Structure formats: structure tokens, C-alpha cells
Image (cartoon, coloured by chain):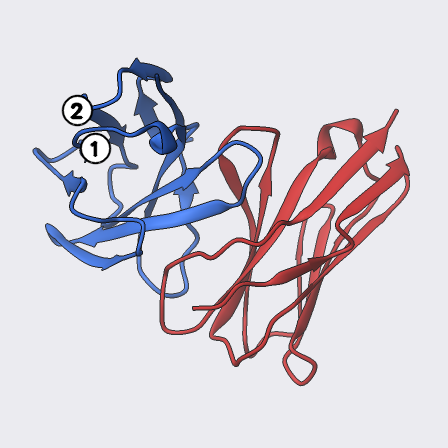
Chain colours: A red, B blue
Amino acid sequence: SQQGEEDPQALSIQEGENATMNCSYKTSINNLQWYRQNSGRGLVHLILIRSNEREKHSGRLRVTLDTSKKSSSLLITASRAADTASYFCAPLQNTDKLIFGTGTRLQVFP
Amino acid sequence: EPEVTQTPSHQVTQMGQEVILRCVPISNHLYFYWYRQILGQKVEFLVSFYNNEISEKSEIFDDQFSVERPDGSNFTLKIRSTKLEDSAMYFCASSEGQLSYEQYFGPGTRLTVT
């Protein structure tokens, strides 16, 4: 298993703006998952995108995957204060062991 | 909506004592996990469990740790002879399947070793 590297480390935006965070990884994957963690609380699964998929949507979330560049992005549209959290990507290949990086800390100001 | 639950929410114990952290996974899930997060650090994988056996464990998961599914609903993490450095949030997670399935996390147990 491998760790994803999220970028940027921190992001501050106003409510209503879009937030984009990126994830890079090193080796081939079966799927890549995005999770959110509110401060000190459990992680919440957001989206799973498989290696043969290029884009996936869930509500205000849009995830893209570029396996040639070994990268993924998470877009949150029309952000809300409640979206304030840390966001993590977890690239997976032949394992279900999630390896989390330091994440992107998103702050959405009302 | 089904959710993973964990008890207690906060456990304080003295160094050298044994603690058992409890989790109730989502009922139709077959794969179970423990993770931990030391304050201010990354969430770290400890162990995965399937079919009453450990599937995979990390270097952190040494002989001090053990997991058990004592009945059809609970999944426990036992830490024998706790150390100060075991102080952390411990998260249980469960999943329907193994490779392309999301993991559902519980709210965590904050373990404080004094």
C-alpha cells in the first residue's frame, strides 16, 4: 500500500467558493478513496474512484483521476462552513489498508 | 443510516494497565479494522480482521495488542500493559468487502495513559 500526498497542505476560502485539492501517488492503483475528518473525529468516506474511471460526482463533490499522471483531484463546489475539515486521499492496490498522509486542511469562512 | 459505534468515548488508564476498546461494526460488514491517531499526527493503520483472523497488521501492532470478535456484533482491541505513548484516538472501521469498498469509521475512543 502507499500513501497519497495531498496538496495544498492548507486552503482558506469564503463560503460559496469552490475548493480544489490534489493528491499524487507513486505506483499503480486499483482505486483511490477520499475521506474527510473533522477535527479529532472519525473519518468519513466521501468518494471511491476506480482505476478505470476518470471522473465521479457525488452531490457537490467531483473527483477526477489521471492514472497516467498518478494524480487525483477533489473539487468541492459552493463550499459551506460545514465543509471545514481535513481531507485525505488513500490510493489502494491489492490491499484494504488505508494509509493516510497529512491531508489538506480546508477552512471555509462564513 | 447504520453506523459504527465505539465505547467508551474516553478511557483514562494508568501505565501498565490493560484496556479493552470496544466497537460494534455495521451489521452486514465482514471486514474490520483498527486505526489510531496520536494527537496532531496522521491516522495510522493498526490491523485488519476477517473471518476471525488477522488479515494484516502494522509494525505498531506488536504483542502488546490483540483483537477479537467475541460474539456476532462486537470487535475489540485489547492493549496489555499500556504505555504513555499508547495515548491516542483509536478508530474502528468496518467494510462490506475488501478491495474496492469504502470503510466506515466510528467516532473513536480517546485513550489517555497516565
Report the amino acid beneath label 1: Ile
Q: Which residue bears the numbered disc 2?
A: B18
Q: Where is residue B28 in the image (x, y as percent from the top left)?
A: 25, 43
Which numbered tag is attached to residue B67? none
Q: Is residue B2 visible?
A: no
**Among the 4 quarters of the image, the one containing residue A63:** bottom right
In the image, A109 versus A61, the foreground residue is A109
A57 vs A40: above or below: below
Q: How far apart are marks 2 and 1 (CA)?
A: 6 Å
Disc 2 element: loop
Which image quarter holds the N terminus of chain B?
Answer: top left
Which sits earlier in the primary sequence, circle 2 or circle 1?
2
Q: Which chain carries label 1?
A: B
Report the amino acid beneath label 2: Glu
Question: What residue sits 10% from the left and 50% below the top?
Answer: B52
**Left or right side of B113 for A51:** right
Question: What residue sits 66% from the left and 41% below the top?
Answer: A86
Question: What residue sits 11% from the left and 35% below the top?
Answer: B72
Q: Can residue B88 be seen in this view?
A: yes
- Total residue callouts: 2
**Among the 4 quarters of the image, the one containing residue A94:** bottom left
